[in-house]
Structures are given as structure tokens and as C-alpha cells.
Image (cartoon, helix red, strand yellow):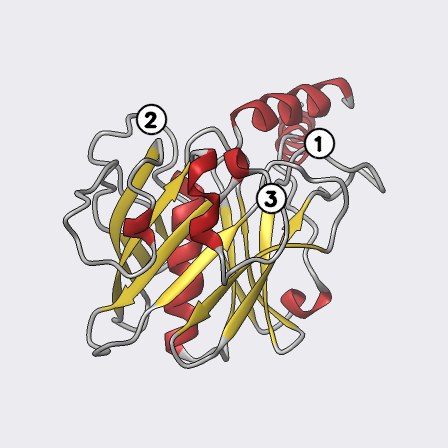
Amino acid sequence: MKNSVFITMLVLLVGCKAPNIIVSPELKSNTSVFDVKGRQGWQFNQVITYGDYSSSKIKRGWTSKLEIPFVVKFSNAHEKLSFTQFTADKQQADVYAVGRLEQADLPLLNGFLNYSINYRNTFVGTIIPIDVSGDYWDFLIYNMESGISNDVICGSAKDTKGNEIIIKGVSRIEGQGSLMQAEFVGFEFFMNGQSVGAVSCFNNGKVWMKDDLNPDIKLVISSISTSLLVKHNLTDNHSRSLIHTNNNSR
């Protein structure tokens, strides 16, 4: 009788396990995968952690008096975030991000994009590594809630030296076959054509990071990942639909 109860409980636990987003084969080996803590509950004094990566308290808002080359231009944006990102390699960066832009802000994106975007779903930010004088990264993610297929480029991050990280939206979930979500459920990061990390933005969240990455790139990927994990209105509706789908499949 006890064995039967144990097996039943085990089956239920396995059945309730949250599925992962579908990532590239490169992230199936030599990659650390971290569960995210800090997304649920009160946003006051919110801190995001995964593995040995962590953020300072997330500040929702920042002063336009800051001298930030890229982000400070979007002073009219309706969502502003700032925090310090800490990595497992003891590096850190100050991160500033804005979302829910005004249509009037679109000309400010000249030089980063050369085609039309949905300004309401655009998310931009600046990453300033603390111990690297004069160096910083700008990132931009556009149409980020319009997932129609996997492997779609929806943004990039660029530094002052010409390095670039391509960002692709992920709209497929393990166990759902070829079914695509109406919204991106995560984002994957590529350098030189190879996947180097990913972030899942539904439920509690999850982060993938290639083990052999340069610590500087880990700092950038973790900074963007944390920014996406704390952004408003990215996953609420999707999380509810995901739970509903899982319940119906049992």
C-alpha cells in the first residue's frame, strides 16, 4: 500500500513538472542551467538570483540626469528599470533598461535598426561593466511579444568595440510538438552563429549559460536575462495559458 502511494505521488510530481522552452542543441551540453528565484511575490526590494548570479534590489525608475549614452534618451518611456548585476566570476555591471516606449521615441533608434518596429513592444537598455573604463553594451529587443515561430531574430546587443550578440525569440515549449505560442516564452543569445545562452520568461524563469564563455560575455547575457525577467507584462497572460494547457492535458 505504501509503495503504491509513493509511486502515485511520484507520477503526479513528474506530471506537474514545468516544461522548458526549446533551445538549440548547443545548450544541451557544457551548459549550466539555473532556476530563477525572486520573480514571484512583492516587487518591493525585489532581488533576482540564479545559481551564483544575482542582482541588487531592482529599482523601477531612474533619473534622466544620469549620463547614459543610449538609454537616457528615452526619458518619456513608461517603464524604467535599474539594478547592478553580479556574476559567478565576481564581475558586476550597472544596468539601465526602458520599455513601453512612446512612438515619438522611434527616431532615437536610428543607427540601431533600419526598419519598422512595434514601439510598444520594444525594450532597450545599457550595460556598464564596473571595472572596465569607457566600455559598455547597448541592447534592443523589438516586437518581443509577437512570437510566431522559433529562430526569429528580434534584437541584438552591441558594445563599443564592435562585438555583437544576436537575440532570437523562442516560442516553443517542450512537450507541445510543433505548437507555437502567441507570445515569445523566452529568448536565446547567439555569438558568431553559435548559441551561448538563453532565458525562459514564464513561470519562475530559467537561465542557460555556456560554461566556456568569456566572463565578460557572461556578464552581458546575465544582465539582459535579469532585465527580461523583471520586465512588466511579459509573461502574465502566457503563464496562465500554460497552466491551463497543462491542466487540460492530464
Mark 1 vs mark 3, foreground winner is: 3
Element type at mark 2: loop
* Residue type indicated by callout 3: Ile
Q: Say what secondary structure mark 1 lies in.
A: loop
Q: Where is residue 219 in the image (x, y as percent from the top left)?
A: 37, 67
Q: Quadrant of residue 74?
A: top left
Q: In which quarter of the image is the C terminus?
A: top right
Query: Which residue is most to the right?
Result: 178
Cα separation, mark 1 vs mark 2, equals 25 Å
| Residue 182 circle label | 1
The quarter of the picture where the N terminus appears is top right
Q: At 84% from the left edge and 41% from the top edge, which residue is drawn?
A: 177
Please report whichever mark, 1 or 3, sits nearer to the chain's N-terminal start. 3
Which of the 4 image quadrants contains residue 79?
A: top left
Which amino acid type is marked by label 2?
Gly
Q: Where is residue 90 in the image (x, y as percent from the top left)?
A: 25, 71
Q: Do the residues labelled 1 and 2 touch (CB within 8 Å)?
A: no
Q: Which of marks 3 and 2 is nearer the N terminus?
A: 2
Location of residue 72 with respect to 11 vertically, above or below: below
Q: Residue at x 65, y 40 (%)?
A: 19
| Amino acid at the residue labelled 1 | Ala
Q: In the rendered structure, find residue 41 and report the number of the disc placed on it.
A: 2
> What residue would you read off at disc 3?
117
**Residue 40's x, y, as percent?**
38, 30
